[in-house]
Image: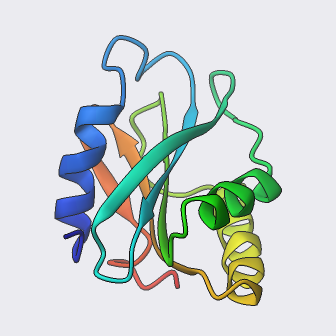
């Protein structure tokens, strides 16, 4: 059960490839059921050194196909700087607003680095 950013971070550590963590950005979504159990995950995009394209339609299509009720967004920062960029904040707001239309709850967005993480939820960005 992923009821904290720490538990989400522990799952994400098993997903991200440490060999490319500091080279390129990747964006993953964790799909959860109503009891916050992991149903699966998917890499939504792989980008460059400082950006990754994210199509929210893909996120919602996969969320609905997996019958997930909750999701956790995650991407890495190759720079090892955990703070969200303005683009990160805008994208997260965009996805959260649209998710609510489908009855999907975004419970966190984790920025992952090789030295730690930043949780939007813990930092009251939701």
Q: Position of residue 48 (x, y in %)?
A: 68, 22
Q: Residue furthest top?
A: 19
Q: How is the image coloured?
A: rainbow
43 or 9, which is in the foreground? 43
Instruction: Identify the residue at horizontal 28%, vertical 81% (top origin).
Output: 35
Instruction: Identify the residue at horizontal 65%, vertical 67% (top origin).
Output: 64
Say if 35 sits above or below 43 in the image.
below
Q: How many marks?
A: 0
Q: Which image quarter is the N terminus in?
A: bottom left
Q: Position of residue 106 (x, y in %)?
A: 53, 76
Q: Is residue 64 left or right of residue 115?
A: right
Say if 45 sits above or below 34 in the image.
above
Q: Is residue 115 visible?
A: no
Q: Position of residue 58 (x, y in %)?
A: 75, 51
Q: Is residue 65 left or right of residue 31?
A: right
Q: Is residue 42 left or right of residue 11?
A: right
15 or 93, which is in the foreground? 15
Instruction: Identify the residue at horizontal 80%, vertical 50% (top origin).
Output: 55
Q: Could you say which quadrant of the image residue 62 lies in? A: bottom right
Say if 73 sits above or below 115 in the image.
below
Q: Position of residue 123 (x, y in %)?
A: 38, 78
Instruction: Identify the residue at horizontal 30%, vertical 75% (top origin).
Output: 36
Q: Is residue 53 visible?
A: yes
Say if 66 sits above or below 108 in the image.
above
Q: Could you say which quadrant of the image residue 84 lies in? A: bottom right
């Amino acid at each position: 059960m992923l009821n904290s950013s720490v538990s989400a971070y522990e799952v994400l550590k098993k997903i991200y490839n440490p060999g490319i963590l500091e080279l390129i950005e990747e964006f993953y979504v964790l799909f959860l059921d109503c009891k916050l159990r992991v149903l699966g995950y998917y890499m939504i995009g792989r980008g460059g050194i400082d950006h990754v394209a994210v199509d929210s339609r893909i996120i919602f299509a996969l969320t609905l196909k997996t019958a997930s009720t909750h999701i956790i967004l995650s991407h890495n920062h190759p720079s090892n700087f955990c703070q969200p960029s303005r683009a990160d904040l805008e994208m997260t707001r965009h996805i959260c607003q649209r998710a609510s239309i489908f009855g999907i709850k975004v419970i966190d967005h984790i920025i992952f680095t090789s030295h730690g993480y930043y949780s939007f939820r813990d930092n009251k960005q939701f």
